[in-house]
């Protein structure tokens, strides 16, 4: 049996309301609710930031050799 779009949206809204109620009960810390909402919208915000921070950190620690290693792995010049 196929679910109609209207029924699907009602189901999603009901589940979102359950999550909001769970968050308001105080079981989760405030930062966890905020982080979950923030990541739920767009997880690439964090993935891109973490990738840049890790790259810069490794570049600072390992120096030019790190860049050469990355280029060797990914087929650079």
Image (cartoon, rainbow, N blue to C red):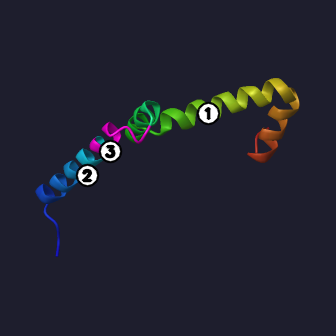
Q: Which residues are magenta?
A: 21-28
Closer to us: 22 or 64 = 22
Q: Give coordinates of residue 34: x percent, y percent.
A: 41, 32
How crowded is the residue under tag 1: few (<14 C-alpha within 10 Å), some, or many (20+)?
Answer: few
Residue at image point 61% right, 33% down: 50
Q: Give coordinates of residue 68: x percent, y percent.
A: 84, 35
Q: Quadrant of residue 7?
A: bottom left
Q: Is residue 11 magenta?
A: no
Q: Quadrant of residue 59?
A: top right
Could you tell which of marks 3 and 1 lies nearer the N-terminus?
3
Q: For mark 1, what is the residue?
A: 50
- Please tell me whether mark 3 sits on a helix, a strand or a loop: helix
Residue at image point 15% right, 58% down: 5
Q: Quadrant of residue 58?
A: top right
Q: For mark 3, what is the residue?
A: 22
The label nearer to you, 2 versus 1, is 2
- Residue 62 located left or right of residue 18: right
Q: Give coordinates of residue 1: x percent, y percent.
A: 16, 76
- Please tell me whether mark 1 sits on a helix, a strand or a loop: helix
Closer to us: 63 or 41 = 41
Q: CA distance from mark 3 to mark 2?
A: 11 Å
Residue at the extreme front of the image, as rendered = 26
Could you tell which of marks 2 and 1 lies nearer the N-terminus?
2
- Residue 65 located left or right of residue 39: right
Could you tell which of marks 3 and 2 lies nearer the N-terminus?
2
Residue 18 to residue 25: above or below: below
Residue at image point 84% right, 26% down: 61
Q: Give coordinates of residue 46: x percent, y percent.
A: 53, 34
Q: Which mark is residue 15?
A: 2
């Amino acid at each position: 049996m196929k679910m109609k779009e209207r029924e699907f949206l009602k189901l999603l809204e009901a589940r979102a309301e359950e999550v909001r109620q769970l968050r308001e009960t105080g079981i989760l810390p405030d930062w966890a609710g905020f982080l979950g909402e923030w990541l739920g919208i767009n997880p690439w915000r964090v993935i891109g930031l973490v990738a840049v921070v890790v790259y810069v950190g490794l570049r600072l620690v390992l120096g030019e050799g790190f860049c050469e290693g990355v280029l060797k792995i990914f087929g650079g010049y």
